[in-house]
Image: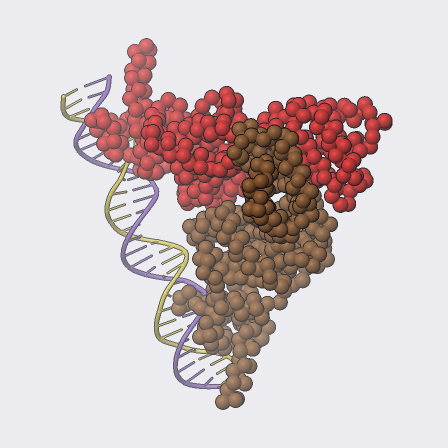
Chain colours: A brown, B red, C purple, D yellow
Amino acid sequence: MEKKSVSDTVVNERAQHFLKALIERYIREGQPVGSRTLAKDTGLDLSPATIRNVMADLEEMGLVSSPHTSAGRVPTITGYRMFIDSLLTVQNLNKQEVEKIRKELLLGGEESGDVLKSASKLLSGVTHMAGVVTLIRRDKNNFRQIEFLPLSDRRVLAILVTEDGEVHNRILHTHRDFSRAELDQAANFLNKSFAGHDMEMVRQRVLQQLNDARDHFDQVMTQALTMAGELVNASEAKEDFVIAGQTNLMEFAELSGLEQLRKLFDAFTEKREILHLLDQFLDAEGVQIFIGEESGYQLLNGCSVVTAPYQVNEEVVGVLGVIGPTRMNYERVIPVVDITAKILGAVLKNH
Amino acid sequence: MEKKSVSDTVVNERAQHFLKALIERYIREGQPVGSRTLAKDTGLDLSPATIRNVMADLEEMGLVSSPHTSAGRVPTITGYRMFIDSLLTVQNLNKQEVEKIRKELLLGGEESGDVLKSASKLLSGVTHMAGVVTLIRRDKNNFRQIEFLPLSDRRVLAILVTEDGEVHNRILHTHRDFSRAELDQAANFLNKSFAGHDMEMVRQRVLQQLNDARDHFDQVMTQALTMAGELVNASEAKEDFVIAGQTNLMEFAELSGLEQLRKLFDAFTEKREILHLLDQFLDAEGVQIFIGEESGYQLLNGCSVVTAPYQVNEEVVGVLGVIGPTRMNYERVIPVVDITAKILGAVLKNH
DNA sequence: AATTGGCACTCGGTTAATTAGAGTGCTAAC
DNA sequence: GTTAGCACTCTAATTAACCGAGTGCCAATT
């Protein structure tokens, strides 16, 4: 029994070697790979027949499968998973490539939105797949200043500036017209009371004051507080999400269905679903790989997602990565995503 | 000679009738239509042989063509053009449909950007093609108020509000740090001097003052004026462009090439080219139809664009329309685009 | 003179049959 | 445990045959 198990693991070690070779080959060629080709591919000098035996074992373990009796083998999802988790040997990028990425990101303009854009463009350009970058809106985005401008027809333009210089604006509807002076007064009050405070705190205080003082509070102020509350609410909702190079996926889609691709594209423009998906990887450490079929989301069938969170000043502020066919060159994509995440973090640190 | 010409025109009238029938049929079925089917389609009680003669004439005129000897006829580009220009009978929408469009647009949220978004969604939804809406940035967007906020590291956040309530913001880099007070003073000056004035005029005055007074002017003010100038410049550049339902085109793309579709999608995300294309129709009156092949743009081969400018307060402010296969149901699409343009104008009038 | 029926002809698409080849599984030998 | 050999399977590509839709033209008809 013991002997069996030892021999078992020996076989498994070699089997894993073959699995790796098979997947790498399949990723390169895209076609079922047979025993003959595999025999030549690996360094070991073994006959096709031997390989066949091993392949039969691998098939039994559910790591590979054959499309039909007389075709080679193709990795299954679990096969890919094993490959990704413990088999692949990432090729680190050379200095030159790293430098190229850094240069391209620095060149990407000053506004933080533009940097994200060029990051996703970069990812899609280098990998020939779709690049995505998200930026979470961190709650500690403190209140800095608010401003109200009267428009016509009982509408007021409210402008809210946060501590780190983001500007939100919104048109609010009020019950009556307000004069410039009234609005200024309200804004002044808010600014004095809340400048530098946490946004959520501002929100709660505003609501509280509204309740406490609804009776004797000046109507202007009441309105102003409501507005501020609304604005704060609104500013929480937004979340940045940038995608580039979707059309790269079309090449690979000749293989997969066209209907599939359409759903994927719709999800991209809809954004919400993808965003939710990527948020899962915020907490993860380093590069994460995610095979479409593994998670109910059937619009990702045939796809894989390679992600990495990126951080500025020790704090995770977003996720970036690429989306492509499950049959992608992980050994190259992984370091690209990894490095890009690090560089993006560094670039953003200098605002 | 005269007799010949008379008989010619007689033939042509009937020929046009057949051309119309053929195109309508082709649009419905998508397949070459033969003499037999066409004979049944038209009210006239004629034999296929007669139709064949007419078709031969039409082919000679370059209005139809046959993919191969034993297929029916298919309209050519010039055939489509004639159909569009003088043959088609638009079916006006009934009240119910119009009301549905209006409702959907009104429901589209308050921000003007959102309305454009829902307009293009609406167009794509109703026509099952891609819907586009552009909004030109009209120059007479007057200066209203400017505000400067100091950030760290010699950066200043400038916020510019225009008369109609649009908010532009931008981070400016300065040669030294400014205090809050300095910035307020500069902003006050600008606001007093320029509130309500034409943006281009502001720009010029700013430049002029910079030249006149570079020596004795306070450095803060100089910086402020530069900033204001930059901001005004920046605010001119932007142009809104919204597209929805691109993926609808994928259905029709099974026919046309996939490479073609990819280029089209890239053009959509690139925006510039499409924008330039649509701008041509700003000056046009009413619905315009544009067949891809007619204008060098080879990425529009196989496509047609149906557009209409829309206006608020007698003034054209943008173009909207749909992009789809040349083989589209013009008789239905045209009134949809027409009505949507009118309703969008009306909705925007109430800001 | 326009219209029509008839007829030979063309050509694309579909089906069926054949073939070639790649690859497997199994068995027996090493 | 490995390998060679062999029978077997299944796909993909090629070829052949055929069907049918549609045309063009000519002669007959109105």
Q: Residue at x 59, y 46 (%)?
A: A209
Q: Position of residue A261 (x, y in %)?
A: 46, 50
Q: Residue at x 48, y 65 (%)?
A: A77
Image quadrant holding the N terminus of chain B, namely: top left
A27, A171: nearer the viewer: A171
Q: For this view, does B113 lie left or right of residue B220?
A: left
**Vertical position of residue B241 compared to residue A257: above or below:** above
Q: Position of residue B314 (x, y in %)?
A: 50, 20
Outermost residue toward the front in this view: A216
Q: Position of residue A152 (x, y in %)?
A: 56, 28
Q: Position of residue A92 (x, y in %)?
A: 67, 62
How many tags in the picture?
0
Q: For this view, does B324 lie left or right of residue D27?
A: right
Residue B23 visible from this viewpoint: no
**Vertical position of residue A147 compared to residue B288: above or below:** below
B249, B57: nearer the viewer: B249
Q: For this view, does A283 lie left or right of residue B289?
A: right
**Vertical position of residue A38 compared to residue B14: above or below:** below
Outermost residue toward the right in this view: B215
Q: Residue at x 74, y 28 (%)?
A: B189
Q: Residue at x 61, y 24 (%)?
A: B140
The answer to which quarter of the image holds residue A283 is bottom right
C9, A169: nearer the viewer: A169
Residue B40 visible from this viewpoint: yes
A57, A181: nearer the viewer: A181
